[in-house]
Amino acid sequence: MPRVFVTGGTGYVGQRLVRALLERGYEVRVLTRRESASRVPPRAYAAIGNALDATSFEHELAPGDTIVHLVGTPHPSPAKAAEFQRVDLPSIQASVAAAIHSTAAHLIYVSVAHPAPIMAAYIAVRSEGEAAIAAAGLTATVLRPWYVLGPGHWWPLALLPVYALARLLPPTRAGAARLGLVWIGQMVQALVRAVEEPPPAGSVRVVDVPGIRAARLRPR
C-alpha cells in the first residue's frame, strides 16, 4: 500500500481521516507544526514542517506517496478572504510543489463546490488551487464538498427545509445537489476511497457532493 502524507491532519476532517487510514493498515505521516505534534493521532508519524513552505517538508515524501491536502482556514466565511489568500492558496501551492519534487503518485485536494451565489473569495482561492494541480500535470483527485456536518458544525441543519424545497423545483434542483450537505463520516469515506482508488496516471478526477455521499469503503 502507498504511504499517505496528510497536511491538515490534526484538524476537523484530518484527525478522523488519519485514524481511518491507520485502521486500514496504511503508514500515515502527518505534517504538523512542532507545537501541534501532540495532536497527531497515535501510530501516525509526526512530520514537522510548515504547510506554506514546500522546502520544509518535501524531504518527508518519497516517490509513489499519496498526498492528502486538508489545510485550510477553519469555519470559512466571507469575512476571511485575507486568510484564504494567506493560508489556503499558498498551502496547496506548496503541496503541489512538494508532489512534483518527490514524484508523488497521487494528490488529493479538498476544494469546494462551485459555482455558488456566496463565498466568492473562498471559491476563487480553491479554484486557483485546482488550476495549480492541473497545470502541474499531477495525478489528482479533487473533492468538492459544500459544508461538512459534524461535531461543532451543526448550524446548516436549520437549512434542511430550504434544501428540501429546492430539490422539488426544477430551476434549483441541480444547485441543491451540487451545494448539498455531507456528513463527516461520508467525507472521510470518500477520502479513503480516493486514496485506495486513484484515477489514471496524469488525470484529475473531480468528486462532487453526490459522489462524496455515494462513496463506500470496500472490505480489506
Image (cartoon, grey):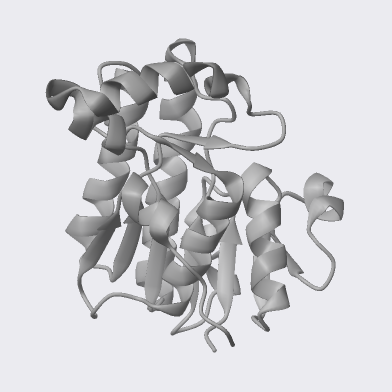
What count of labels does the image hold? 0
Which residue is found at the position 33% from the left and 49% from the top? 210
Q: Is residue 197 left or right of residue 69?
A: left
Q: Is residue 14 visible?
A: yes
Quadrant the N terminus occupies: bottom right
Q: Is residue 41 left or right of residue 119?
A: right
Seen from the viewer's position, the closer of residues 155 and 201 is: 155
Residue furthest to the left in view is 171
Q: Is residue 35 left or right of residue 156?
A: right
Report which quarter residue 202 is drawn in.
bottom left
Q: Is residue 50 left or right of residue 140?
A: right
Q: Is residue 126 above or below residue 56?
A: above
Quadrant the C terminus occupies: bottom right
The x and y percentages for residue 44 are 76, 70
The x and y percentages for residue 79 are 47, 10
The x and y percentages for residue 131 are 22, 48
Which residue is found at the position 26% from the left and 39% from the top? 127
Which residue is found at the position 57% from the left and 68% from the top? 5
Q: Is residue 169 above or below residue 57?
A: above
The x and y percentages for residue 201 are 24, 80
Report which quarter residue 71 is drawn in.
top right
